[in-house]
Image: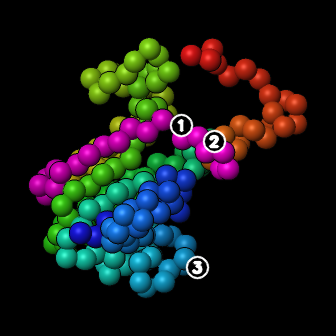
Amino acid sequence: MNIIITGASGLIGSNLTKLLKQNHFSVTKLTTNPKLVNDKDTFLWHPDKGYIDIRCFKEENIIINLAGANIFDKRWTDQRKKELADSRIEGTSLLFDMINKEGFNVKRLINASAIGIYPDPCGPSVNEDQPHGDSFISDLCIKWEAAAHLFDAANIPVTIIRIGIVLDAEKGFLEALAKPIKMNAGAVLGTGK
């Protein structure tokens, strides 16, 4: 079984890739960075141009779709919001179109989403039955999940994982959060609960 990971260079993707390889899984990565391509286990794709190197597909595949521009690294201008949406929705749609067109054997799609889909993800509890929010992030998650559910039409099981903020001591959100604190400009962010 070949596991194709999009977003493999991100915080979750890089750790997941490492864990899967340690457990002897075959892992293929898709990247938009030509410098990372090696024609062995890392292949090029450009969702914005409708391109994917089909050599990434093997006899049997599971796709873990984590690709998407970083939510926290830039201000949310209209242009940035479009980039955030396109990097998720176009990539997911491209995977579906390519599989549908070429008939690649895909056993399952595991697709990322976010708890930002809920109106108050920090409330006492949330579940899949809770109404969706009406924020930009909620709308983005709804559209990304809809793109993932295109795979249902091809009888490919879809698993959606709604991820919260991932904390890592070295990078990601915690790193960005630490910067103002290190410059004595931090503030209390929550109740501690």
Q: Which residue ends up furthest to the front in the rendered image? A: 23
The answer to whether residue 45 of the structure is visible from this angle is yes
Q: CA distance from mark 3 to mark 1?
A: 29 Å
Mark closest to the chain's N terminus, 1 or 2: 1
Q: Nearer the viewer, residue 184 or 48?
A: 184
Q: Which residue ends up furthest to the bottom in the rendered image? A: 39
Mark closest to the chain's N terminus, 3 or 1: 3
Q: Which residues are magenta?
A: 152-171
- Secondary structure under badge 2? helix
Q: State the quadrant of the N terminus.
A: bottom left
Q: Residues within 10 Å of mark 2 (few under 14, many from 20)?
A: some
- Secondary structure under badge 1? loop
The answer to whether residue 4 of the structure is visible from this angle is no
Q: Name which residue type carries label 1.
A: Ile
**Residue tagged 1:** 165
Q: Nearer the viewer, residue 183 or 16?
A: 16
Q: Name which residue type carries label 3.
A: Lys
| Image quadrant in which you'd find residue 162 | top left
Mark closest to the chain's N terminus, 3 or 2: 3
Q: State the quadrant of the C terminus.
A: top right
- Secondary structure under badge 3? helix
Q: Position of residue 26 (x, y in %)?
A: 33, 71
Asked whether the beta carbons under mark 1 and mark 2 sit within 8 Å of each other, the answer is yes
**Residue tagged 2:** 173
**Residue tagged 3:** 35
Left or right of residue 51, residue 189 in this image: right
Q: Marks 3 and 2: which is nearer the front?
A: 2
Q: Is residue 75 magenta?
A: no
